[in-house]
Image: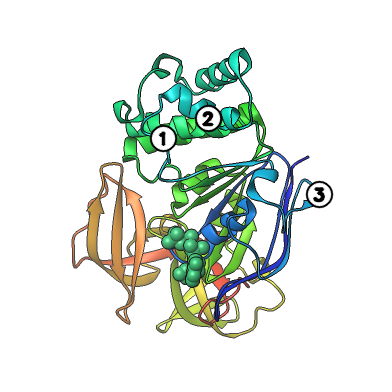
Amino acid sequence: MANVIFKDVHKSFGSFVALEKLDLDIRDGEFVALLGPSGCGKSTTLRMLAGLDFPTSGEISIGGRVVNDLAPGKRDIAMVFQSYALYPHMTVGENIGYPLKKRGIKGAARAEAVQKAADLLQLGALLDRKPKQLSGGQQQRVALGRALVREPQVFLLDEPLSNLDAKLRSYMRAELIELHRRLGKTMVYVTHDQLEAMTMASRIAVMHGGHVQQFDTPDAIYNRPANRFVAGFIGTPPMNQVEGTVEGGDFVIAGHRVPIDRTAYSADLHDGPAVLGVRPEAISIGSGEGLPATVRLAENTGHETIVTLELPDKRRISARVEAARRLDVGQPVALRLDPAAIHLFEATENGARL
Ligand code: ATP
């Protein structure tokens, strides 16, 4: 069993509070992504789990054992960094085998473990090369191999793919998913890339300002964002957010009524100011009845067109339509918002979902 629990963890650097009341319960064998913008505290969270940094208060446990005062080497974890941190003078095989050498494992036992990790990562043919004779993706696989040979209970990965180009990143994403499936080990993965988190993790902890904003499945994070930060962070382009007022069965934007399904919201939904959230793909652009808008920009990416629309009060929102759709800049249109896809949030800076 190697579940990971953060219980009421706080972390300050001097007077600066980096993490406040962090509670996370990561299940054995789970692939969890810590996702958030720069400075949100995700690396600090991982470093505390690795034993490279220490909580100011609270408790961290791995597999039921409190590790707060345990040295990194005693935690049964292996960490993979963005920088790979390979030894340049050692071969691939020596790099992968190094953690075992340090543990005093010699000869055939070490060679066998190195071979096993190399086979798993398709590095078998490269064992005699030096790191500088490898591509970025191959170097990252060696760094993974060095973590694998330790057979840790928990893998910690800190933005391991961010030095790779887009194509290689997508290839390595698939490799990591496959590796996790085969090993079945707990993985905690830090990233600022929502695509990585959405495609690889079984659950995502979205972090911002030293707080976990939502800890849930990728599906729930996308389809039921807990607050305005999560709604605005996930999705490209992200969910539109428009301030207005709830009036009976409608949401009123600049004097125009958009029908909503009141039964879909919590009992806390009262008439008055709120924020309407709607994903670009839940807006249909037509003519006649609907919220009036003007086309300001149509960006065709080849497989879809992202349309920037201006509402009567000059606020802008975006919609996603099929690439073949022709829309002219300046064209007046009428927008229909699918009531089943309308989210409502409290009208505060990071308003909670209603
Ligand atoms: P990034 O993606 O840029 O690495 P992050 O989400 O991983 O960001 P952390 O590295 O965890 O962020 O840092 C969280 C906050 O704590 C930041 O505001 C950072 O400036 C601050 N911080 C981190 N380490 C220290 C330190 N040793 N001393 C002072 N402040 C620190």
Determine contact: label 1, label 3, CB under 8 Å: no
Determine contact: label 1, label 2, CB under 8 Å: yes
Q: Residue at x 26, y 47 (%)?
A: 301
Q: Which residue is mark 3?
A: 64
Q: Which residue is mark 2?
A: 98
Q: Nearer the viewer, mark 3 or mark 2?
A: 2
Local SS, label 3: loop
Position of 39 relative to 166 (above/below): below
Nearer to me, 263 or 64: 64
Cα distance between the residues tagged 3 and 2: 29 Å
Nearer to me, 143 or 297: 143
Q: Residue at x 47, y 29 (%)?
A: 95
Q: Earlier in the sequence, mark 3 or mark 2?
A: 3
Expressed as whole percent of the image width and height from the top left, the position of residue 2 reads: 74, 42
Q: Earlier in the sequence, mark 1 or mark 3?
A: 3
Local SS, label 2: helix
